[in-house]
Image: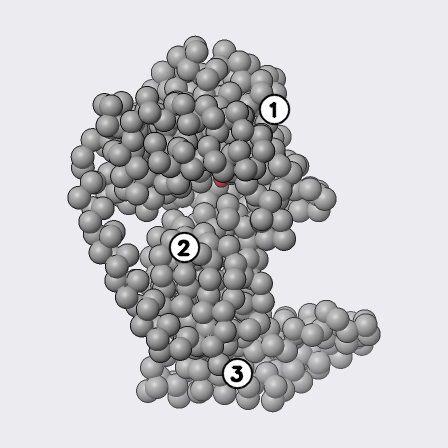
Amino acid sequence: MPFTLHGIPVSRGIAIGRAYLIAPAALDVDHYLIEPPQIEGEIVRFRAALALVERELDTLRADLAADAPTEMGAFIGVHLMILQDVMLVQETIDLIRTRRFNVEWALTEQLERLTRHFDDVEDEYLRERKADIEQVVERILKALAGASPAALHGGCDEMIVVAHDIAPADMLQFKGQTFQGFVTDLGGRTSHTAIVARSLGIPAAVGVQQASALIRQDDLIIVDGDHGVVIVDPAPIVLEEYTYRQSEMALERRKLQRLKFSPTQTLCGAKIQLYANIELPEDAQAALDSGATGVGLFRTEFLFMNHKDRLPEEEEQFIAYRRAAELMNGLPVTIRTIDVGADKPLDSMGGDGYETAANPALGLRAIRWSLSEPQMFLTQLRAILRASAFGTVKILIPMLAHAQQIDQTLDLIREAKRQLDDAGLAYDPNVQVGAMIEIPAAALAVPMFLRRLDFLSIGTNDLIQYTLAIDRADNAVADLYDPLHPAVLQLIAHTLREAKRVGVPVSVCGEMAGDPQLTRLLLGMGLTEFSMHPSQLLVVKQEILRSQIKVLEKPVADVLAAYEPEELQAALGRLALA
Ligand code: PEP
Ligand code: MG
């Protein structure tokens, strides 16, 4: 039966394919479909892992010291029982046979099914059995990892990932795979998961409540990433319509390619810089392919996220930053220092109240964390500085709000340079240092920044979050997340105006910069540097090529003077026609 779900559009385009449901526990293991002739081999692999774990547990029990508490023996006995339980063993085998899941996927899927209702159980003894099942599954997965052939990995064509939620770090693992789209129950338009989904360049919708409960494995679904709509089991006529629209969009994208190497300037000849936002050094290639004239934002925290036990050493970071600088071949690469916290927690940070903070978005995030960990910060600064010897590197600091934070940061940069001098390592002594303007306080007190720094970059994602007090990752308040709120527009306009007055370059690197519907507004406010995901670059460029700044100034002034929604809509309408 066809039905439609509505969520938040985060990545444009139309995807048509089979649902590929991912249980949260399954995110840490490889998940791929096996061919029918591989089914029996996969089951043999499973049985071998079960036998191995059984032997391990037997040995553990036999080796128990005579004076070990009796519960220890009982506890191992429970694990041995779970290991033979039909619900775990037979049902996993059924998933391998009927769904053609690889064994790790089948096992974690079955774990999810078995444990789904445990949290609601009142009986503490029963609730604890959930942990036992998880521990047994963990052992089996370890045994499989030891015995598994190299994972085939990679989804199949026309697969659309459906999940309750995906952490940004997990989303990153999908890079390079062949999924056609993403749907999640949770998330907001500028949550980092959505940003990474967008960077994959495939249609995605988040905040599609109940999607992972209502959509079944292998259901045929359409994701309309322009409208945040998911159509499940579509009628043939609907399917035909979307297939047609999909091919129209592909044609449109091909046409846009023609703009790739033309200079970016308005009809009146004003030169505009279009930079790329990247998450990994290799993304620099996509930046170049899109025609970007530099990297306006390299979100380095993604390098740190998949390090479960430790942060990357200086050398490892240096190699990554140098790679981006070298790929960009002299074009500017703006490397932002680590911005962890809120929806980007770091496993290796250790508790320290971080995960338990009631409001992590207002807590020890970004530069606040870096300044609280000066040795870690110095390591990153040295690595960035060393990379500056291999290209045009700039350092960008996230979430600054206080003068003493800027001063401390600049002191640490000086200290990192001194350390490199002592070690005889090269760096660009004139490396530019800039600040993200993403807290309303920073926008309002912008002269404090302009006096101390070389450039600014407006992070509209956080600026909106903090101005409107809307958690950007929370779909429950996503409708209130409004880039066109007069307060947000005033803060952006004020920052641009003040920076222009003293001749300090300023860019916008939040998602607003990549929204073609906002291009004219930003141009009319005086913005000349846009940084966005490479997939957005050509549509924004198209808007710029059609615009004439002089003509935009009056309607933009009207937009900025409008405080009533109707007035604002009317002014925006005039701007669109200007
Ligand atoms: C922003 O806040 O606009 C920004 C670009 O940074 P991030 O999305 O990584 O917080
Ligand atoms: Mg930010």
Q: Is residue 178 visible?
A: yes
Q: Is residue 453 left or right of residue 134?
A: left
Q: Label 3 neighbourhood size at 10 Å, few (<14), some (14-19), many (20+)?
A: many
Foreground tag (1 vs 2): 2
Q: Residue at x 41, y 55 (%)?
A: 226
Q: CA distance from mark 3 to mark 2?
A: 37 Å
| Helix, strand or loop at mark 3 | helix
Q: Position of residue 572 (x, y in %)?
A: 45, 35
C-alpha separation, residue under disc 1 versus residue under disc 2: 33 Å
Q: Which residue is mark 1?
A: 441
In the visual, does 59 lie left or right of 252? right
Residue 216 placement (x, y as % from top left): 50, 76
Instruction: Report helix, strand or loop for mark 2.
Output: loop
Quadrant assignment for the C terminus: top left
Please give the residue where the numbered disc 3 appears in the rendered image. 92
Instruction: Look at 56% across and 78% down and name the residue there.
Output: 110
* Residue holding disc 2: 226
Q: Is residue 478 above or below residue 449?
A: below
CA gap, disc 1 and disc 3: 54 Å
